[in-house]
Image (cartoon, rainbow, N blue to C red):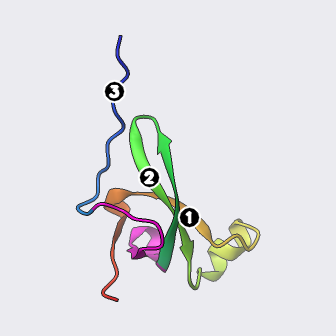
Amino acid sequence: MKKAKPEWTGNFTPKMHQRVRVKVNSLGFGRITGFFEECGWKGVIVTLEDAPEWHKRQRNNDPRSWVFGREIELADH
């Protein structure tokens, strides 16, 4: 049986270092610094510019967030 190709759920093609806004949990702006695949879906790793305090505490000051296409949008600039 052939393995299904992972799908991207966003409305743009993500590129390294692209500036995006993470809509989920109001995480804010950041840059795409990596990619991942999980359960048949493609996602991006975003390094946040100014992570919320709760995120910093929860992630031990790691500013990265793993998100899927529908959870982000291109930043205006």
For numbered disc 2, what is the local secondary structure? strand
Rendered location of residue 58, percent (x, y): 70, 67
Q: Residues within 10 Å of mark 1 (few under 14, many from 20)?
A: some
Which residue is the site of mark 2? Answer: 43
Say above or below: 22 vs 39: below
Q: Nearer the viewer, residue 77 or 57?
A: 77
Q: Secondary structure at mark 3?
A: loop
Q: Which residue is mark 1?
A: 65
Q: Given the image, on which type of amino acid does mark 1 rest?
A: Ser
Q: Residue at x 76, y 69 (%)?
A: 60
Helix, strand or loop at disc 1?
Answer: strand
Position of the C terminus by quadrant: bottom left
Give whichever of discs 1 and 2 has the lower sequence position. 2
Q: Residue furthest right?
A: 60
Return the x and y of residue 12 as percentages of the image width and height: 26, 63
Q: Is residue 9 left or right of residue 16?
A: left
Q: Left or right? Give the position of 40 relative to 33.
A: left
Magenta span of residues: 13-29
Q: Which residue is mark 3?
A: 4
Distance from disc 3 to disc 1, alpha carbons, whole Å, reads 25 Å
Tag 3–tag 2 contact (CB < 8 Å): no
Residue type, label 2: Gly
Front tag of 1 and 2: 2
View extreme (top): residue: 1
Question: In which image quadrant can residue 39 be found?
Answer: top left
